[in-house]
Image (spheres, grey):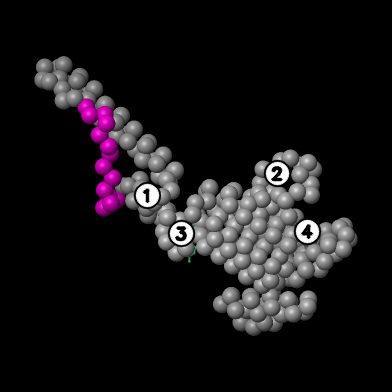
Amino acid sequence: MILRRIRENIDAIFDQDPAARSRLEVVLCYPGFHAVTLHQLSHMLWTHDFYTLARCVSHFSRVWTGIEIHPGATLGRRVFIDHGMGVVVGETTIIGDDVTIYQGVTLGAGAAARMGSATRGTKRHPTLGNGVVVGSGAEIQGDIMVGDNVRIASGSILLKDVPDNSVVVGVPGRVIYRDGQKVKDEVPDIEAEAIKSLKDKVRKLEKQLQSVTACIESLQLSTPVAPVNEEEEAPTSPTSTDPVDVFLHGAGI
Ligand SMILES: CC(C)(COP(=O)(O)OP(=O)(O)OC[C@H]1O[C@@H](n2cnc3c(N)ncnc32)[C@H](O)[C@@H]1OP(=O)(O)O)[C@@H](O)C(=O)NCCC(=O)NCCS
């Protein structure tokens, strides 16, 4: 049974990673493979109440691989931790089958971490469904449910449940695709809204300044001053090369 799962893990890594040239290379040089295999041992010790020994195995694995998986965490089959350095998987995490996790990912306790021992024994960490991909540096915090086949972009921070078949990006994480359909427009882009509001404000201030300058000049020249329309919105042309306009029209930064 254990050997079958180890072989399955090797095959999964070899199939998924184009950089792998042989299964021997996977066995010798893949920290994700070492961490998942050692976790099988530490988890078995943990479930047989050898808690300290289990933690020692997990700690050795962390020193060896740079990947910290608490022995209490439950991992499904064919979990692939690619590169892996800096990955942290908390005690009550549940990971489904065929999940891929890149380097620097935290599956953490979120707000419960602040409550110390009061939350001992409670579910504090996320549950990942089958087929989930977690991009490098993503943070998934708290007892939340990440549905099947969810893809989480690098650097995202997730604090809420995510429905199946979604793509999530950003801080805080927003669903931008669900079941293959784009849903970005339904969700306000808070950063873009803030920048747009500041741009409008600057434009109004510039107009007021122009008006004051014109007023001073008119006092000197005795000509009437044109009134300023403060409600006028700043134009944001899709062809503008202004970096703010480029951002507001959805270019990547
Ligand atoms: C999020 C991810 C899983 C989605 O993959 P995908 O479904 O194949 O789709 P894409 O890569 O085309 O990205 C889908 C959208 O998410 C956006 N996106 C991707 N990564 C993003 C990020 N980190 N932050 C913000 N937006 C991101 C893309 O711009 C694209 O937007 P668009 O449809 O408006 O053009 C993938 O882009 C990703 O980040 N994978 C992790 C990769 C990783 O960590 N690699 C480390 C290797 S060492």
Q: Position of residue 176 (x, y in %)?
A: 45, 56
Quadrant for residue 149, please give it.
bottom right
The residues tagged by marks 4 and 1 sit, at their Cα atoms, a distance apart of 44 Å
Instruction: Tell me which label, 2 or 1, sits earlier in the chain.
Output: 2
Task: Identify the magenta region.
Answer: 228-241
Query: Label 2, on which residue?
Result: 112
Residue 151 appearing in the image: no
Depth check, mark 3 against mark 1: the one in front is: 3
The amino acid marked with disc number 1 is Phe
User: Around disc 2, counting alpha carbons within 10 Å, would you say few (fewer than 14), some (14 to 19), or many (20 or more)?
Assistant: some
Image quarter (top left, top right, bottom left or bottom right) of the N terminus: bottom right
At horizontal 26% and vertical 42% (from top left) the residue drawn is 235
User: Around disc 3, counting alpha carbons within 10 Å, would you say few (fewer than 14), some (14 to 19), or many (20 or more)?
Assistant: some
Q: Which type of secondary structure does the marked residue at label 4 adopt?
A: loop
Instruction: Tell me which label, 4 or 1, sits earlier in the chain.
Output: 4
The residues tagged by marks 3 and 1 sit, at their Cα atoms, a distance apart of 20 Å
Query: Label 1, on which residue?
Result: 247
The amino acid marked with disc number 3 is Tyr
Q: Nearer the viewer, residue 155 or 188?
A: 188
Residue 72: numbered disc: 4
Q: Is residue 136 one of those drawn in magenta? A: no
Query: Label 3, on which residue?
Result: 177
Depth check, mark 2 against mark 1: the one in front is: 2
Instruction: Tell me which label, 3 or 4, sits earlier in the chain.
Output: 4
User: Around disc 1, counting alpha carbons within 10 Å, would you say few (fewer than 14), some (14 to 19), or many (20 or more)?
Assistant: some
- Does residue 45 appear left or right of residue 66 in this picture? right
Q: Nearer the viewer, residue 60 or 72?
A: 72
The residues tagged by marks 3 and 4 sit, at their Cα atoms, a distance apart of 33 Å
Residue 67: numbered disc: none
Instruction: Tell me which label, 2 or 3, sits earlier in the chain.
Output: 2
Quadrant for residue 225, please give it.
top left
